[in-house]
Structure formats: C-alpha cells, structure tokens
Image (spheres, rainbow, N blue to C red):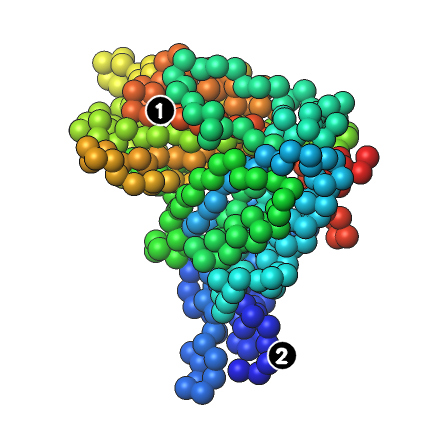
Amino acid sequence: MSSDITRRRLLGTVGAAGAAGVAAGASGGVLGARATQDGPTALTTIGSTSVSFHGRHQAGITTPLQARGHLVAFDLAPGADRRAAAALLRRWSTAAQRLTAGQPVDDDTGVALDAGPSSLTVTFGFGRTFFDRTGLEKQRPEALEPLPDFTSDTLDPKRSNGDLWLQIGADDGLVAFHALRAVQKAARDTARLRWQMNGFNRTPGATERPRTVRNLMGQVDGTNNPQPTDADFDRRIFVPADGDPAWMAHGSYAVVRRIRMLLDGWESLSLAEQEKVIGRRKSDGAPLSGGTATTPVDLNKTDAAGNALIAADAHVRTAAPETNGGAAMLRRPFSFHDGIDADGVPDAGLLLIAWQADPIKGFVPVQRKLDRGDALSAFIRHEASALFAVPGGAAKGEYVGQRLLEA
C-alpha cells in the first residue's frame, strides 16, 4: 500500500464508498463493488461513517446509538488549576477532532490501525466539583445542584460524580478503546481516573432493518423517546441560546445512572407478567393498549370488563410525560455486563444517559414518580449516579469548554 495513505483512511481507495457511507449507514451493507484480487479491501459502511466533532451541539447526544461505549469520569489532580484544566480540554478536543475524522493522534498506540472512524464520538461534561477546584463557582449552573435522594438508590460514591466526564461511543470496539486510551494518556498529570463504565448495544446491520434496541431484559428500549423532529425537542433537550449561564448555550445536562438489572428474578416471570410490568408487548414493543411499537400509549383504554389495559404501576404509565407534568428526557443508554459472581448472578444492566435542558424539570420528576410506584423497581437497582453540564459544541478553532474556561 502506498505510503501516502494514512492509517485508518482507506476510504479514498474504494471510489465512492466514503461519500456514500453516511447515507447507506442504516442498511449495514458493504459499500462499493468487491475489490479485485490485487486491490485493497473496501471498508464496510460501519467503518466508513464519521460524525463531525464540530457543531452547534456536541456529538454523542442525538447521534444514533453506537455498538460500543465507554463512560469515564476524572478528578483534577491536586494543584491542577483553571489554566491546567483549559490545557487539558484543549488536548482532549484536539485528540477527539482527529480521532473522529479517522486520523492518528500524537504518540498514537496503533490500536485502531486499518479501521475507519466507525461513527466515533467523544462528548465532554463538567461536574459540580469542577467549578470549586478551578475557581469558577460563579459560573456554575443552578441546574448542577445535587440530585435528590431516591428511596430505591443504593449508590456507590466511588462510582458516582466526578470533576470531568467523557462519553465515548463507536461502532467498533477497538476504535472506542483507542479513543479511551488516547484521552487517558492526554490527561497526563492534570486529571486522574475516578471511575469507568463500559457498555454495548446492538451492532448496526445485525437486524434485517433498523430497529429500536433491546435491553438485557429483552425489552425494546427507547420507543417513546423524544425525537429531533418533535416541535419541542430542542426546548426539552438543549439549553437555549440565551440561557444562563451564557457558556452553556446549546448545551445539555447528562444524568448518568448505573442501573443493575436483577435478571434472575425478572426471568422467572412469565411473558405475560413481564409485559404487564412494562406495559408493552415483548415481541415488538407495541403498547398493551394496541397498535404497533410507534403507536402512542393509550393510558385510558380498558378491556370489555372495564379494566385498564395498562396497569396502574406499569413502567410506561409511571414514566409517561402526561403523568409527570410533561417532563421528558432523551434516553441514550448502553447495556453493560461486568461478570458473574460466585453465586452465578450476572452483574449486568443499563448505563442510562438521560439528556435534558434542565434535570430538575426532566429527570427528577420522572424518577420521583418511578421511585413511588413503578412495577419495574422490584427488578432493578440504581448503583451509581452522576450529573454533568455538557456545553455546546466547539466551533472550528475552539476547544470544548473554551467559553467557560476563558471567559
């Protein structure tokens, strides 16, 4: 192969494959004609798709769910000040910009050699304690007030909160790990890892057509999510351009929860019992009130005997915006599996990332309602929690957080 072809950038050798990657991404097919015996092998759609680092919003919020994810939180090292934090965010942003374009970084490990960008995204956020440690208390948003306690929480403080947070997602495991290693090395002596959580979703192309993903309970998960086509989507998910503080314009707030699924108990239920707990059919995600997966849930519909088709404590009822004063959030999760203990119980569940313009109006009222009477609560356990302010996207020539750190 010619030496002028950079690592991870075979796109130029397969004709129109690179240009077609994004448009064909939903099909999961192979782009272009089969390579000749002497020619290079074309990247598949999965490898060739890329997500721009720059934009009004950070990537990784409305980006389609990726197959692999890493959630990592860092604490600033003792003595690291605002200037050191700015230098770190500059290094991280430079690395993310290059990696999401399929380019190498300084001191590159070569882990993702030969792979395309694979829809890689790197998203950055600031925790409440970051502002104390950098002397920026006056710039801390009111929305970063600590989340209230919930009765069902069994939180591990060592796996909660943090000064800085990164969400890494990609459709290839090596590409995701490569980005994780790059940001960890770029942290140098400025920040130290506080916690890390690794997740996964279905790989694009694994089903005959694009479908809403299933969680480890086997349930279609995310059917009732807000959609970017909704008239009020931006108002619910993103801080407005004239929001307060100004540096959070076009940003969002991420609630991160590690939710353990008590799978042995769940799997002991009959199919009918599982569907009653959720309020949807397991086979296709359609509500028990009728229709298809995309049919709105009819909470008032009854059977011939006058009994509600959606139980009073069904998950879809307790989580529905109409039963929570219109509260809504964009759920963008990864599943996780961290092994099986000596008793044969899997440590598995959901890494929930809930996005909203204001967690006090989004996550909190919904979780309070779930905490009081959700049938699903008997089969899950919230084991870690964090809240981060995720600023808007960086323009070309900027780094993420620049408007905060250089104000």
Separation (CA) of disc 1 from disc 2? 52 Å
Identify whether 224 is placed above or below 56.
above
Q: Is 145 rendered above or below residue 397?
A: above
Answer above or below: position of 358 versus 219. above
Q: Is residue 155 left or right of residue 365?
A: left
10 Å crowding of disc 1: few (<14), some (14-19), many (20+)? some
> Tag 1: residue type?
Arg
Which residue is located at x 44 percent, y 49 percent? 68
Residue 82 drawn at (x, y percent): 74, 35
- Residue under pointer 1: 381
For marks 1 and 2, the one nearer the N-term is 2
6 left or right of 198 in image: right
Give the tally of numbered discs. Answer: 2
Residue in the image at 59% along x and 58% along y: 99
Rendering coords of residue 88 (x, y %): 68, 45
Figure quadrant of residue 75: top right
Residue carrying label 2 = 4
**Furthest residue toward bottom:** 38
Would you call the spot at circle 2 few (<14 residues within 10 Å), some (14-19), or many (20 or more)?
A: few
Q: Amino acid at mark 2?
A: Asp
Q: Quadrant of residue 362?
A: top right
Please tell me which residue is depicted at 52% across the width and 15% down the height of the picture.
Answer: 148
Q: Which residue does the image show at 27% across and 14% down from the upper left? A: 307
Q: Nearer the viewer, residue 327 or 299?
A: 327
Check residue 163 in the rendering and tell me which mark sits there, or answer none.
none
Residue nearest the viewer, comparing 35 with 398:
398
Quadrant assignment for the C terminus: top right
Q: Secondary structure at mark 2?
A: loop
Q: Secondary structure at mark 1?
A: strand
The answer to whether residue 26 shows anywhere in this view is no
Q: Specify whether 252 is left or right of 397.
A: left
